[in-house]
Each structure stands twice: as structure tokens, then as C-alpha cells.
Image (cartoon, rainbow, N blue to C red):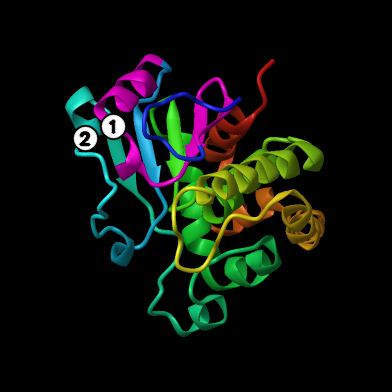
């Protein structure tokens, strides 16, 4: 379900206590008030330090004023040589395998931060598509969510940021109309399905030190409603 939080871009409900969106600086005071009413108490920000510079279209809002806790858990180090094949940024599930090989410790830490943060939790990167999609998708897989549902969530986020680009300039991505967007999605969806078939999120978390308590928290946080 898409969320009506004023200013929020590409904002979606994952389950009753978990949400995802693009960068939080776009959200207005009214938007944060709506998020609070929806149960948001924690924000997990996946961006690196260099992405935190203000932008002209940012809202002058402070979620902390409502008591919302912001956790910064960057999933990457842009200064690491392993980031070179990903430049300028992670932009497709076709890159998820390399990203996880390069920054698996960081990604696992982000999944656990989402799982253990006081509910409800909203996860964001910049667009709310790939880093957010990777963290949400791994958590969902560990919680037993079917691959089709994970893929559907990624597609919704890709559609959401594409719609945003219709009216907002981006230096590297522009709005793609229906047939072009469908062609754009096809290899990315196939890559995401292949990635999900190959990865074992529970094993990833265990190899990064997650024990039974943490895995139970992941299962609880990322499980579908009902």
C-alpha cells in the first residue's frame, strides 16, 4: 500500500510495523506526524555520509521532534575499491551479487538494525529502490516471504521512483513511459529472481554473527501480515 505522508517519495507499507521510502529529508512536518500516527518510531537510513548534503527541495522538518529515532546504518563505503564497479551508485538487482560480496557485513548489519529497532520502522536510502529493496528483500526472505512477493515490492518501488522522475529532474535517471519502462524492468526483475534463488539470507546473517534471538527478531519484523 502506498503511503500518504506529506512530502514522502516512493513510500510504501511493507507490513503493519515496517515501511520503506526515499530520502527522509523530503518528508514535511505534516508527513512525519502522519508517519507517527501510522506507528513509526524508528528510521533506518542506509546512505553513506557523502549523501547527506541538503538539497533545495528538502523540507525543514525534524522527525526527532516527535520522538522518532534516526539510525544511520550505511550499507556501503564509496571509498572502498570494491565500490568501483557500482559507480555512480547501486542501480539494479543485476549488481546485488557484487554488492553483497563487497559489503555483506554492512548489509547484514542493516537487516538486523531494522529487525531490532523499536517498531514501527521505516527504511530508506535515496530513491527507496535498490539499497532499501536489498535490505527489505533479504529480511523478507529470512522471514519466509515468497520470492514473488519480494519481487512485487521491488517493482512497486521502481514504479514509484519512476513516477517521481516524471516531474523531478535526476542527473542520471529520467522518467520512462510505459513500454520503455517495461523493457527497462524486464532484465532487472529477472536478475532479482536469480539473486533471490541463489542467496540464503539466514546463512548470510548467521555468518555475520546473528544468533537465534536476532534471527527470531528478523522473522518477526519482516513477516507478512497475518
Q: Position of residue 81 (x, y in %)?
A: 46, 85
Q: Position of residue 114 (x, y in %)?
A: 47, 39
The correct choice, above or below, for 120 with respect to 54 in the image is: above
Is 142 left or right of 127, judged from the image as shown?
right
In depth, the one of 202 and 102 nearer the eye is: 102
To which residue does mark 1 refer?
28
The correct choice, above or below, for 211 with respect to 222 in the image is: below
Q: Which residues are magenta?
A: 11-37
Q: Quadrant of the C terminus?
A: top right
In depth, the one of 73 and 167 nearer the eye is: 167
Spatial CA distance of label 2 from label 1 is 5 Å
Q: Position of residue 101 (x, y in %)?
A: 61, 71
In depth, the one of 134 and 203 nearer the eye is: 134
The correct choice, above or below, for 8 with respect to 107 in the image is: above
Which mark is on residue 3? none
* Residue in view at x 51 percent, y 29 percent: 18
Q: Quadrant of residue 154?
A: top right
Is 65 left or right of 203, judged from the image as shown?
left
Are discs 2 and 1 less than 8 Å apart at CB?
Answer: yes
Count of all numbered marks drawn on residues in the image = 2
**9 in the magenta segment:** no
Q: Is residue 142 visible?
A: no
Q: Quadrant of the N terminus?
A: top right
SS class, disc 1 = loop
* Residue in view at x 40 percent, y 34 percent: 117
The correct choice, above or below, for 172 with respect to 211 in the image is: below
To which residue does mark 2 refer?
61
* Residue in view at x 66 percent, y 19 percent: 225
Amino acid at each position: 500500500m502506498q503511503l500518504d505522508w506529506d512530502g514522502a517519495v516512493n513510500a510504501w507499507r511493507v507490513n503493519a510495523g515496517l515501511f520503506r521510502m526515499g530520502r527522509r529529508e523530503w518528508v514535511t512536518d505534516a508527513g512525519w506526524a502522519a508517519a507517527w500516527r501510522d506507528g513509526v518510531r524508528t528510521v533506518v537510513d542506509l546512505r553513506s555520509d557523502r549523501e547527506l548534503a541538503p538539497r533545495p527541495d528538502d523540507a525543514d522538518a525534524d522527525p526527532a521532534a516527535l520522538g522518532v529515532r534516526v539510525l544511520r546504518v550505511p550499507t556501503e563505503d564509496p571509498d572502498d575499491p570494491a565500490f568501483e564497479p557500482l559507480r555512480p551508485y547501486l542501480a539494479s538487482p543485476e549488481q546485488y551479487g557484487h554488492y553483497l560480496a563487497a559489503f555483506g557485513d554492512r548489509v547484514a548489519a542493516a537487516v538486523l538494525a531494522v529487525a531490532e529497532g523499536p517498531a514501527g520502522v521505516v527504511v530508506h536510502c535515496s530513491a527507496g529502490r535498490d539499497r532499501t529493496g536489498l535490505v527489505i528483500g533479504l529480511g523478507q526472505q529470512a522471514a519466509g516471504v515468497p520470492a514473488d512477493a519480494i519481487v512485487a515490492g521491488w517493482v512497486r518501488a521502481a514504479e514509484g521512483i519512476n513516477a517521481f522522475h516524471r516531474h523531478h529532474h535526476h542527473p542520471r535517471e529520467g522518467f520512462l513511459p510505459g513500454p520503455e519502462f517495461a523493457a527497462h524492468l524486464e532484465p532487472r526483475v529477472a536478475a532479482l529472481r536469480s539473486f533471490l534463488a541463489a542467496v540464503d539470507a539466514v546463512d548470510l546473517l548467521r555468518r555475520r554473527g546473528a544468533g537465534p534471538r536476532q534471527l527470531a527478531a528478523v522473522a518477526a519484523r519482516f513477516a507478512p501480515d497475518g
